[in-house]
Structure formats: C-alpha cells, structure tokens
Amino acid sequence: MNSERSQGFPATSRRVWRGVPLPIRRFVPGLRARIVLLALSLAVLPLLLYGFSTLAQTQAELKSAANDRVLATARSLMDRIRIAVGPARSGLLLLRDSVDDPGIALDAKLALLESSLGSLPEVRALEVGIAGRPSILLLERPFKTRLDALDADPVRVLGAGDASVGWAERDPDRVMTETPRRIQALDLWLLPLSVPLREPLAGRDAGLTLYLDLTSLVRALGEDGADSTGGSWLLDLNGRPLFRTGSASVPPLSGTALPDLGSMAPGALLATIFPGEGGVPMLGAFAVLDFPPWILLVGASEGQAYTLAARMRRHLLLWLSICAAAGLAGALILAQRIGRPIREMALVADRVGGGDFSVRVGRVSRHDEIGRLGRRLDQMIEGLERGRRQLERLARQDSLTGLSNRRWVLSYLERLLSEHQGEGGAIAVLFVDLDRFKRVNDSLGHTVGDDLLKLVARRLSDSLGEDELVARLGGDEFLVVRRGVSDREAVAEIAARLIGAFGTPFQLADLELHLGCSLGIALAPRDGIRVAELITNADMAMYHAKEQGRGRYRFFDAELRTRAVRKLALDVRLRHALERGELEVYYQPQVETGSRRVVATEALLRWPDGRGGFVASPGEFIPLAEETGLILPLGDWVMESVCRQAHAWRDQGLPPLSLSFNVSSLQFGQRDFVASLRGALDRSRLDARRIGLELTESVLLEDVDEGIRRMEGLKEMGVQLMIDDFGTGYSSLAYLRRFPLDYLKVAQEFVRGLETNPQDASIVDAVIALSKTLGLKVIAEGVETQGQLDYLVERRCDLIQGFYFGPALPADDFVALLEQGPIWTMRS
C-alpha cells in the first residue's frame, strides 16, 4: 500500500483484472494548468460582474424613480392631514382650558362652548361627556338643520356617549381620537377628538369631544392619492383600514402584513413593496403620523422598465472577447512565474500541517508578491509556534487568576486517583466558594469583581503549602487538592487556615471589601473514588456549610447524601402535591386583648398526608420551594385560597375577620404582584381591608425604595401590612419610620422567654413601646402559657396568637372553634 501511494496511486482507487488489483489512473491537472484555467476564469469574471452591476444599477434607478413618486405624494398628503386636524386639536385644548375653571357654573360653561362652536372651522358638534350621566350635545346650526331635515337622532348618528366612560383614567394633556365616522345620508366624514377635563363637572369626571368634518380632506386625498391603479389609505396602528380613496379596493393588509414601522419617527416615510388587489405587487409609501395616530399608505402599481437590457448584452459580449484574449496571454506567463515557488511553499505548508514548526521557506528572495508571501508564510509559522506554546499554557492555567484551571485540575485529580493505592494517606478535596461575592459584581461591576478574584487567588495560594494545590473551577469557585492526608484534623487545619485568610479585608484602590468563604470537604477513597463523585460530594458539603451560617467548613458524610436525596424527592412530591391539590391552608386564631374575641387569623400552609399527620413541616418544604422557585405558584395559590375562603365565610354569615398570610421575598419582588393581589380580591369580591400581608424585614431591605413604592400601592388598595418576626432582622428605625405599616409581629422566640429570660422581656417591652410611638398595632405570636398572656395584656399588646388559644386548624375546624363562643372565656 505504501509503495502504491508513493507512486501517486491512491490505495482506494483500484480495479480488479483476473483477480489482480490494478491501480486506476486519475487525471489531476498540474499547477500550471490550474493557473491557466484560473486566469481564464478571472478574465470572464469581470465581464459578469460588470453585467450584473449594470443590471442592478438600472433596477435601482427604476425603483428609485417609483419610490420618489409615491414618497412625494405621501408627503403632500401628510401635510394636508396636519393642516386639517392640527387646528382642531389646538382649539379643543383651548376650549378645555376655557371651561376648566371650577368657579364657572355648568350652564355658563355650556353657553361658552355653544358660542365658541361657530368659531371652530370644520367642527360640526361638541359633546360634553359626564361620567354616569347622558352626554350633552351641541350642534353647529347648519349641521343641525341638515340632521333635522333627515329627522335623525344626533346621538345615534354621531355615536355620542362612547367617550364619556373612563375620563379619570385618561391623560389630561393628551387628545384622543376615535375611528372616523361616515354619515352616508349627508355624505360626511366626522373625526371625534376628545380630551378629559381636569376639574369635575357636577362632582363627576367629565370630558370634551368635538366632531371634525374631514369630508374635504377625504376628497383631497382622492384627488391626489395615486394613479388609476392605486390609491391612498388611512389605517389604524393595527393595519385596519379607516377609509380609502382612489379606484383600487382596500389592500389586503393586516397587522402582520404591515412592515416594521416601530423604529420610524412620526412623520418619517418608508417606501416598500406590498401585495395589492389580486396579488399584484404594489409599490407603496408608509408613514406613521404623530397625530392622529394613523398610518398613511399611498400605493401605485409597480412599473417594469428594463430598456437597458440590449445595450448590456452588447457590452457583455465585447468584454468577454477582450478578457478571454488577455487572460489566455497572461495565463502562460503566470504559470511559469507563480507555479514553482507556490509548489515549494506547498511542501513547507504540508510539513507544518504535520506538526513540524521548525521548517521555513527561507529561499524565496523575490521582492514581488510571491516573495512577500514566502516571508509572511515564515512569519505565520513562527506565530503558530508561539500560539501552540500559549495554548499549552492556557490548557492548564486560568486566564484571569493565573491558577490552574478546571480542566487541568480535573485531569490532575484523575491521575492522583488512578495512582492511589491506599497507602500514604487519603486525598483531600476542598471545595471553596466565596460568600456574598455576587453582591460585589452587582453593586461594583464585573471589573471590580475580576480584580477581587485575582486578590483572592493570590491570598489562597499564599495560604497553602507545597503539597497543596489550588485551582479555579469558574466564577467564584475554587478547588484545593491535598494528597497524603493522615487524618481529618490535618484537613480541618487546612480549611481553618483558608477561612482565616479572609479575616483581613481586601484593598482595591480606595475600596475596602470584606469577603468570606465556605468550604466543603470530601476525602478519597472514603467519600468516592471518581473525580465527579468527589467534587459533587464536596460541593454538597459546601452548601450545607453555607446553610449553617457561612464562613464555615463541613466534611461530607452519608447524612448529607440522605438529605440531598430526600430534598430532591421532596421537591418532586411538592410539585405533584401542588398540581393535585394536596396542600391545604390552616387558620390560627388571633385574639384581641380588648374585646377578648377572635378578630383575625393567620393563614398557614400545611401538607397533610391524609392519615392525620403531615408529609413535611412548613420549615422544611417552604425553604425548598423558595430555593427552587416553586414558591411563586405556591404563593399565588395561597393568595387565591385565602381570598376565596374569606368570601365563603362572609357568605356563611360569620363575623368579619381579617385574614393575613406570609409573602416571600421572591413573590413580593415580582412586578405584577400588586396586580395579582388585586385580581384575586376582585374575583372573590372581597374588601381589601380584610386582607393582611406578613412581610419579613429581609424582604423590605433588599430594595428599600422599590419596597416602599410597592407597599404604598398596596396601602392605597386598603391592604393591611405587617412585619413578621420583628426583631430578628436588621431593619433600622429610619427605615421602619418610612414603611407604611399597620402591625408589628413580635417574634415567638422572644415571647417564649418572657417568664424566664429578662432580656427577652426587655426586647418585647421595647417593641411594644416602639409600636405605640409609631402608631402601629402589635401582634404577639407563640403565646402558650397564662403567664405570657398576662404579661402581654398588662403591656397593652393588641392581638395574641399562639397555642394558648389554639393551633392552626383546617377551615371547617376553625369555624367550629368560632361557633363555640368567646375563646378567652373558654380558656379561663
């Protein structure tokens, strides 16, 4: 096979004669022949390029002429529309300002409007719309005379009264338009223009509408619209025709057939091709008017004028003859001048392709393009050699920090595990993750974050010994590998050393940044003998260390795997439980200390197992839902359930109760949260004052200004707002004063220690005193003993919640508890 290939016969190109394989000779043109063929091709190519460019130029000229024609027509029509509608718009605003004085009586305002009607050109009627009342219609005398002659109802003819709804929601400085209305009997086109009054009429929201006569404009559009095969159209912003002129029917346009006009400034023009009547291509000019908010379309049939084709063909034949003769003469010269050095450079390129970067062209001494090509080829070979060395370095080094990278450390760890024979100690893998690094990126930018990662890498390297390797896995994750570990204490010493390295703040220019880290540790072969298994286990241990408070380290053990498996299984079960309706809302009574009656209740989510117990506690599955994002549909379901239950209790005739439920930070941060709550209240026809939202301090401190804006929107609806577990977060008194709150809920961990811990009692006293000073009510949760109750009643706590009065109960059991009578009397 090798001998055949050396003779130029590929081993795969053979035939068989009498059982003997024979090579098949294939004709492959030499380099000189290829140069001749290439030169001939290049001689013809300029001719083709010239021909196509001439054709393209001619077509462009034809299209440009057609475009200019329709654009000029459209520009003229736009000016006519502005002249027709602009004065009416200005006049409407002046009329509104004239009658917007609250000191002028209604009759005087109507008289002013009626007297002004004749001074407004082309305005046939004025309408005063008052919310909840019939519209007041003022007609121009000639127009009224024509309507009376038809014995027609002006309100029905004009469609009056439609714009009088929703004046309060409209922008008082914006004039609104409606679809032009055609009165067939009078051959009139009327355009309603409306604007709300800033001051109410007769104590109600009101607005002013004028009806502008567009008949002359429509006729002008018909005269200047286009040629006999086209026309002009006015469309709304969705592409629906308002009216048209010209002889053609309405073009088959819809919202999806319109060109993209979103990037066009009002008044700009766009010429394009669109399908006309019967699918005939039409050339049209589109314009988006600033006022009225219409789309103007002027269309005409696309002309076909290609008179230059014959001249182009003659030129093409002439250039073909010239280029072919010149190409044939030059091809022979090029073949000799280029062929030999090209073959030499091809041999060099083959050797470089085989991995030999020591070869150079060198011998090419010419000073023309071939010589420059040879010298550039040598430079490229040198660059490839440098690139190969750099790639080898990048294959093992992180480009940002200079540490070993993920790929290399995984290969190194794989090699260590394969060589490990169970002697010389274990292999320790420490997974390092920076605490709160995302805040640095989000607040200071990725450039500062990258500089901080470089400092972290340097500090980690300085904290390790010669037998310990640190690598960057990616982002803010690092991996430390130590071989020959004798016991856990030695690994714990390494982990403590790494955590201690973050005790000193990092200095970046004029910034002082405090950063910590959490570590997870896995040991081979005890915790795994595969790289992926070890890193996964160390990562799992690291996350558990973060859950315990950050700035810690944790060894992997079987319990973590069990917890991870249970967590995964619980996540799947929780999603199914939400889909199947297996979750249930329980209600715990809140007793008012003054009346000693149940006046409110907190809605608490529970997961019954159907056998009198629970699948998991809220403290287990709610944090899991927050971690996986399931808290959003879960929170929406609780909100809908609470509103429906409040509506059902109201229909049952139960005393009015306030119902509160917890809102997670993820749910409160959704842009549509306020709208979702309003929708739930509307669907249940429930008074918003009966609903309370329990928010944690951490929820409000994530974005204080946005949180306050959102809370103010909820307060405008009437929703009650309260801070849950007050005292366990980090909110300052300055923020607390800005929050529009109704209640503070004392954390049960302080209530639990009222009888035994003087510090807890002092905290509760301070919270109650602070609430009274700020005008807020206080709810104490977790009350379980008579002593705790007496203490809170003595200090005028407003509401009491806890097992002393009862646990959280299903809705039916909660109703049964209410029907038993005063709950305080029963406990006494």
Image (cartoon, rainbow, N blue to C red):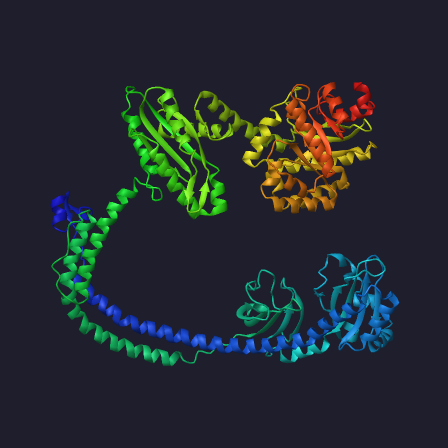
Q: Residue at x 80, y 22 (%)?
A: 824
Is any part of residue 768 visible from this angle?
Answer: yes
Q: Which quarter of the figure is the C terminus placed in?
A: top right
Is any part of residue 805 visible from this angle?
Answer: no
| Residue 107 coordinates in the image, percent (x, y) | 88, 67
| Residue 570 coordinates in the image, percent (x, y) | 55, 27
Is 391 above or below relative to 650?
below
Q: Quadrant of residue 174?
A: bottom right
| Residue 208 coordinates in the image, percent (x, y) | 78, 66
Nearer to me, 474 or 789: 789
| Residue 580 coordinates in the image, percent (x, y) | 63, 31
In this rendering, position of residue 807 left or right of residue 529: right
Nearer to me, 770 or 353: 770
Is 100 above or below relative to 213?
above
Is 79 above or below relative to 625?
below
Nearer to me, 138 or 546: 546
